[in-house]
Amino acid sequence: MLDPSSLFGNANLNFRSFASDENILQHILRLSEQQRGRSGTPPASKDAVKNLPEVNITDSHCKVSEESKEYPRCSICCEDLTDKATQLPCGHLFNSECITQWLGEHNQCPVCRHELPTDDQDYERMKAQRQQQNSSPQSQ
Ligand SMILES: [Zn+2]
Ligand SMILES: [Zn+2]
């Protein structure tokens, strides 16, 4: 009989001890989600989600040291990304299921809040106005 914990046990234990940052992040995310409540950001555009690139995880995505290789981690479920990941325009990597589900409710990267396009025209109008105000070079 194969004990699954013997497959994942030791190798992952090392990584897990570094996971506290991500756990805090998750906690903050959950808090800010509660604060935003139901009227928060609209879901990301379905087309935008569909067109997100899937990347193969290579050493260039990992922190490689002499003793270990630290894979990038999906900050939604805190699992290591060892094979394939979906990349947001901001460069952050996630499990494709996790980020698809997330973007079904929010249009922002859960890590850096980079905004993706939405199908919500009111929201897009507001966003365009906001950006115009922010980037107006002639403001005296
Ligand atoms: Zn995930
Ligand atoms: Zn991001």
Image (cartoon, helix red, strand yellow):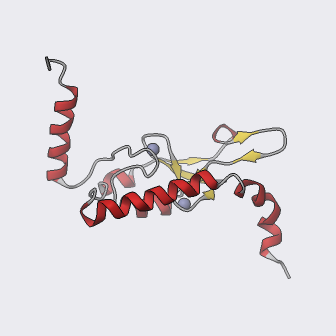
| Quadrant in which residue 120 is drawn | bottom left
119 sits to left or right of 104: left
| Quadrant in which residue 7 is drawn | bottom right
Instruction: Locate residue 73, reporting x and y percent.
Output: 60, 52
Quadrant of ligand 1: it is bottom right
* Residue at image coords 28%, 47%: 117
Total numbered badges shown on the rendered structure: 0
As drawn, 3 above or below 42: below
Quadrant housing the C terminus: top left
Instruction: Locate residue 79, reporting x and y percent.
Output: 62, 60
As drawn, 9 above or below 32: below
Instruction: Locate residue 14, reporting x and y percent.
Output: 77, 55
Please identify the residue farthest to the bottom as the structure is shown: 1
* Residue at image coords 69%, 51%: 18
104 sits to left or right of 13: left
Q: Nearer the viewer, residue 27 or 113?
A: 27
Q: Nearer the viewer, residue 47 or 63?
A: 63
* Residue at image coords 80%, 46%: 68
